[in-house]
Every structure is written in C-alpha cells, then in structure tokens.
C-alpha cells in the first residue's frame, strides 16, 4: 500500500461504512476476545453503530422488532467492545468482545453456534450454560 492510500484509509470515518448494501444495515460477527469463539451474528444500523461507540457495549438493530436493543438488556449478559474491524467492502463488522455472563444465546448456550451438522443431521453440540427460562421468564425469548 502506498503512503497516499494509507493516509486515506486512516482518515476514514463511520460514513465510510457501507450501510446501503443491506438496506441500511451492517452484518456484525461477535467474537469472544479470550477464546476467539464466534458467539453470534447480528445487524446494526447507523444508530446502533453510534450507540455501540458511545456506550462501549454492543447495540444491535432487531429486524424482527424493528428497534435497537443492547445485547444483555434482559439477561444481563452484555457484550463489552474490545476491538472492531471491518471487511474490505466495509459492509460487515467483526467485533471482539468481553462477554459478561455465561452465554449469549437466548436458548441458554455460550454461543448461538451450538449445533453441528453430523451425518445429515443438526445436533446440539454444546452444553447449556444457563437456564433461559430463569433469565427470560417474563419475555417471549424464553425457550420451553
């Protein structure tokens, strides 16, 4: 990379992220800073991105509820930002986090990637790390 390109890259701001490819959203991969395990994938609009920068905790845009939500606002299992990277197209983020709690999955697992394909079947490959009915007893998130 020549010095002119390096200077241009260093001066990029949030407006250089491409929120247009997914109708105003960025795909966001969440990775544990200690284990390097992928914990979940979510979406951010520009407002969620700004709130994440302001608070230091991951804030998503819920496509199903059409609103912002801070991961952990119900469970207390928040995601504290350690580092952020964007891909070469600037339409996706990798956020490395300190996971505050036993898991991020609303089904009670450490990771939302708790199923593995084996012999043409999806099997649960991880133990539950918390009881979703205890954590989400007053919400529709609870898994029965």
Image (cartoon, rainbow, N blue to C red):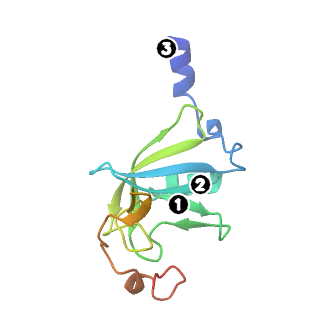
Furthest residue in direction bottom, as rendered:
138
Q: Residues within 10 Å of mark 2 (few under 14, many from 20)?
A: many
Query: Mark on residue 59?
Result: 1
The residue located at (54%, 57%) in the rendering is 42
Dot 2 falls on a residue whose secondary structure is strand
Among numbered discs 3 and 2, the one appearing first in the sequence: 3
Q: Residue furthest front?
A: 119
100 in relation to 42, above or below: below
Q: Earlier in the sequence, mark 2 or mark 1?
A: 2
Residue 112 can be seen in this image: no
Residue 94 location, x and y as percent?
46, 45
Which of the 4 quarters of the picture holds residue 133? bottom left
In the current view of this chain or complex, which residue is farthest to the top?
A: 2
Disc assigned to residue 1: 3
Query: On the image, numbered disc 2 is attached to which residue?
Result: 44
Q: CA distance from mark 1 to mark 3?
A: 33 Å
Q: Position of residue 122 (x, y in %)?
A: 43, 63
On screen, residue 55 above or below 109? above
Q: Is residue 87 visible?
A: yes
Q: Residue at x 45, y 73 (%)?
A: 106
- Quadrant of the rendered image containing residue 43: bottom right
Residue 45: image quadrant is: bottom right
Q: Are marks 2 and 1 in contact (CB under 8 Å)?
A: yes
């Amino acid at each position: 990379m020549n010095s002119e390109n390096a200077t241009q890259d260093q001066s990029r701001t949030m407006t250089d992220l491409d929120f247009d490819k997914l109708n105003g959203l960025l795909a966001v991969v969440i990775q544990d800073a200690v284990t390097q395990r992928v914990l979940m994938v979510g979406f951010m609009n520009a407002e969620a991105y700004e709130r994440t920068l302001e608070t230091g905790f991951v804030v998503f845009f819920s496509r199903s509820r059409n609103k912002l939500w801070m991961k952990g606002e119900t469970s207390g299992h928040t995601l504290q930002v350690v580092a952020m990277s964007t891909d070469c197209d600037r339409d996706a983020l990798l956020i490395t986090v300190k996971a505050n709690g036993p898991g991020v999955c609303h089904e009670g697992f450490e990771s939302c990637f708790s199923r593995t394909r084996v012999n043409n079947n999806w099997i649960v490959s991880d133990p539950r790390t918390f009881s979703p009915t205890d954590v989400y007893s007053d919400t529709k998130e609870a898994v029965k």
